[in-house]
Amino acid sequence: MRESLGHDLVRAHTVYSCVTGLRAFGLATEAGGDDVRGVYVAPAPLFWRFDKPPTQVSGPRAEEFSWEIERFCSLALRANPPVLECLHSPLVERLDATGRELLGLRDAFLSRRVEAGFRGHAARHLGRIEADIRSHGEPHWMHATHLLRLLISCRDLLRTGTLAVHVGDRRDDLLAVRRGERGWEEVRGWIRTLHEETAAAAARTPLPEEPDRARVEDFLVRVRRASAGPAQVPVPAAGTAHRLPGSP
């Protein structure tokens, strides 16, 4: 029942969705396999029950993942890289008025917290790579590619105050790593250099110390109030399936 509710919410109440992953990064080498990420607004009456609506949903399409808007904003304020990359994807798939306002808040989520957020994700990729080396004698080159891409994004974001998802002129270098055409020592040297450049960029970044939480919260409260209106879905009776109006 909960999975069904989640899928209904995504179908009927998505305010923004986009393509992320290799095609958004500019690293796709063949068609297909797009990752779709989205944001939905659960109608406020669904929060009035003991059983709350899901904060995130996998599906209903393959390779699709969505966040409820409050969860999405919370993660973005904490500088979660996949969420920020979703918010800045150049490949928008679906957008309504609420989604447009969310995109207009992109700068409110950016702060010096991105250094810790992106470095943390890069460290997890490095841990996977080191485990691969111990188990198989060489890195998983896709993990190495994403580690480098994360550090490049972080460095450039700290330098400019703008998050660029597409890798731009580093595409050929990153694809060479992905194909295993660079030795691990060379890649490890590039990683060290990027960490040094990221630290230097953090010391003089134009980004504010903290994100604009008040601005984001004002948006979220207005979205919740709008979703509580009489035209929205009523609270379902106890023990009934959570089907939403307009859902297939």
Image (cartoon, rainbow, N blue to C red):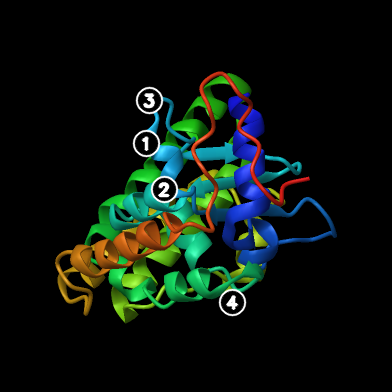
Amino acid at dot 1: Trp
- Residue 166 image point, x, y percent: 58, 71
Q: Tell me, yes or no, whether the two marked residues, 2 and 1, touch with CB atoms within 8 Å.
A: yes
The kind of secondary structure element at disc 2 is helix
Q: Is residue 3 visible?
A: yes
- Residue 116 image point, x, y percent: 26, 52
User: Which of 4/169 is in front?
Assistant: 4
Are there few (<14), some (14-19), or many (20+) residues within 10 Å of tag 3? few
Q: Tell me, yes or no, whether the two marked residues, 4 and 1, touch with CB atoms within 8 Å.
A: no
Residue placed under numbered mark 3 in the picture: 50
Earlier along the polypeptide chain: callout 3 or callout 2?
2
The kind of secondary structure element at disc 3 is loop
CA gap between label 2 and label 4 equals: 41 Å
Vertical placement of 118 versus 213: above or below?
above
Quadrant housing residue 162: bottom left
Give me the disc on residue 168: 4
Image quadrant containing the N terminus: top right
Q: Tell me, yes or no, whether the two marked residues, 2 and 4, touch with CB atoms within 8 Å.
A: no
CA gap between label 3 and label 2 equals: 13 Å
Asked if residue 104 lies left or right of residue 237, the reply is left
Residue placed under numbered mark 1 in the picture: 48
Quadrant housing residue 168: bottom right
CA gap between label 4 and label 1 equals: 46 Å
Are there few (<14), some (14-19), or many (20+) residues within 10 Å of tag 1? few
Q: Is residue 181 visible?
A: no
Earlier along the polypeptide chain: callout 2 or callout 4?
2
Residue placed under numbered mark 2 in the picture: 44
User: Which of 117/136 is in front?
Assistant: 117
